[in-house]
């Protein structure tokens, strides 16, 4: 029997960052993760899964002393963010208007996770249990008991950071409000003619947006949103044929490029009906998933863990029962409405742009034109997106 104060199920970006935030306490923490991140090599191709890291997320990663290592591996700052539908309806955000060097950074998920795991190794009170699967979770009087093969673990607080299909959420019998967007997203990793760009852009089409995320060096990631049937057909094409489809269907901004890798996933909105139960808490995608239109998914998760760590640390300092539901409710009250607001905003974008009705098309393009001239409003939108 191994006793811990906190067990975090899921050692991805969100779960690992939470462990780093809590490691400054004297609490004994365990992370359970099936797969360790692959060691970094500068010659490795870019990963498909990347995230747009906001200014507030960057600051959190600085606070736990991992941002310098992330930058030493691979990250790509971007100065501009542009979105449009029709010609003349371009909405452009400029970091100089925000008096900042960049609006954010595009970083491979694995790079962030690897930097966090390296940081965790500095703490003697955090144990990483990788390559193992949980066979059973049981609620007990003092918290939770987990069975991993021949190992039995117990904790006062069980935290689910195990993604959209959370086992922790299922075991706790926490329901979700969810629906499919009737769209899939295709990720296309490319090598570009031009070196690192300083802009991320997205053009709206009735079938879904098409976007470019800049990456370090002569690399970029394209995102193609479309119907499940269309994405499946694209995924089955030879890369030479897919390249021609990209040329025919993306804005004429790419220059010469080669496709390196592809992948796809469905778009689903989920929101847990509650984030906490007795001796249990959900964070990140286990608590909520969002349409990735604005790249806010991981940023919301990092906001979650920043808030939860503050609640636990504050209660621990005051010698309160930090694992108690009455303490943890402070986290849910602070985070639930913010997550719901961002989910709803993305839903409005999705519903507004996912059709080709002429009156609505005219209205939304007019709105983009007006927004481009409304400098104060643009700053407020960008401040919220950046977490400032």
Image (spheres, grey):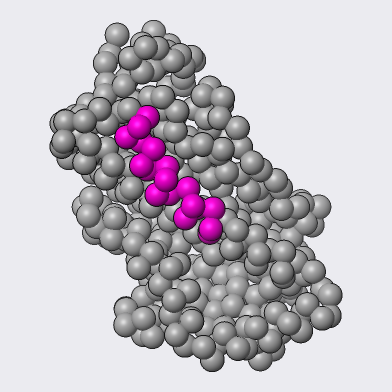
Q: Who's the residue at 57% across and 43% down the image?
A: 271
Residue 381 in picture, x, y percent from top left: 48, 74
- Main SS type for the magenta part? helix
Instruction: Please state the horizontal and vertical placement of residue 2, each as a whole percent of the image.
Output: 28, 13
Q: Position of residue 90 (x, y in %)?
A: 60, 85
Q: Is residue 121 above or below residue 306?
A: above
User: Is any part of residue 50 visible from this angle?
Assistant: no
Res 6 quadrant in image = top left
Residue 116 position within the rendered picture, expressed as x and y whole percent measured from the top left? 30, 45
Q: What's the residue at 27%, 21% (across, down)?
A: 4
Residue 351 sits above or below residue 23 on the image: below
Q: At 50% across and 41% down in the image, what residue appears?
A: 287
In front: 70, or 325?
Answer: 325
Quadrant in the picture for the C terminus: bottom left
In the picture, measured across the screen, residue 55 lies left or right of residue 251, that is left
Quadrant into which the N terminus falls:
top left
In magenta, the rendered stretch is: 325-342
Query: For residue 343, what is the image quadrant?
Result: bottom right
Residue 338 lies in the magenta-colored region: yes
Q: Is residue 138 magenta?
A: no
């Amino acid at each position: 029997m191994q006793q811990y104060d906190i067990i975090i199920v899921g050692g991805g970006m969100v779960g690992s960052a939470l462990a780093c935030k809590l490691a400054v306490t004297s609490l004994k923490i365990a992370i359970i993760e099936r797969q360790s991140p692959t060691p970094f090599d500068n010659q490795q191709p870019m990963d498909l899964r990347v995230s747009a890291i906001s200014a507030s997320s960057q600051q959190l990663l600085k606070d736990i002393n991992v941002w310098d290592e992330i930058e030493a591996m691979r990250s790509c700052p971007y100065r501009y963010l542009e979105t449009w539908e029709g010609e003349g309806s371009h909405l452009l955000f400029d970091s100089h208007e925000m008096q900042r060097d960049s609006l954010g950074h595009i970083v491979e998920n694995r790079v962030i996770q690897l930097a966090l795991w390296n940081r965790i190794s500095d703490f003697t009170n955090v144990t990483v249990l990788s390559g193992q699967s949980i066979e059973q979770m049981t609620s007990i009087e003092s918290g939770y008991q987990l069975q991993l093969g021949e190992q039995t673990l117990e904790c006062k607080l069980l935290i689910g950071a195990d993604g959209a299909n959370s086992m922790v959420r299922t075991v706790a019998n926490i329901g979700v409000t969810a629906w499919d967007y009737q769209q899939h997203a295709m990720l296309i990793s490319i090598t570009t003619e031009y070196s690192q760009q300083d802009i991320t852009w997205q053009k709206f089409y009735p079938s879904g947006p098409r976007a470019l995320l800049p990456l370090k060096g002569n690399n970029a990631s394209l995102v193609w949103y479309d119907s499940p049937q269309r994405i499946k057909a694209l995924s089955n094409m030879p890369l030479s044929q897919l390249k021609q489809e990209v040329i025919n269907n993306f804005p004429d901004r790419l220059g010469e490029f080669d496709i390196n890798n592809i992948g796809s996933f469905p778009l689903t909105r989920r929101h847990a009906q509650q984030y906490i139960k007795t001796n249990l808490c959900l964070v990140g995608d286990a608590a909520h998933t969002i349409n990735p239109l604005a790249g806010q998914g991981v940023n919301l998760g990092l906001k979650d863990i920043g808030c939860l760590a503050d609640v636990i640390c504050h209660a621990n300092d005051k010698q309160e029962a930090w694992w108690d539901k009455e303490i943890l409710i402070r986290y849910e009250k602070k985070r639930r409405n913010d997550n719901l607001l961002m989910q709803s905003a993305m839903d409005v974008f999705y519903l507004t742009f996912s059709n080709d009705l002429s009156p609505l098309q005219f209205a939304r393009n007019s709105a983009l034109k007006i927004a481009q001239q409304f400098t104060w409003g643009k700053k407020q939108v960008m401040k919220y997106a950046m977490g400032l």
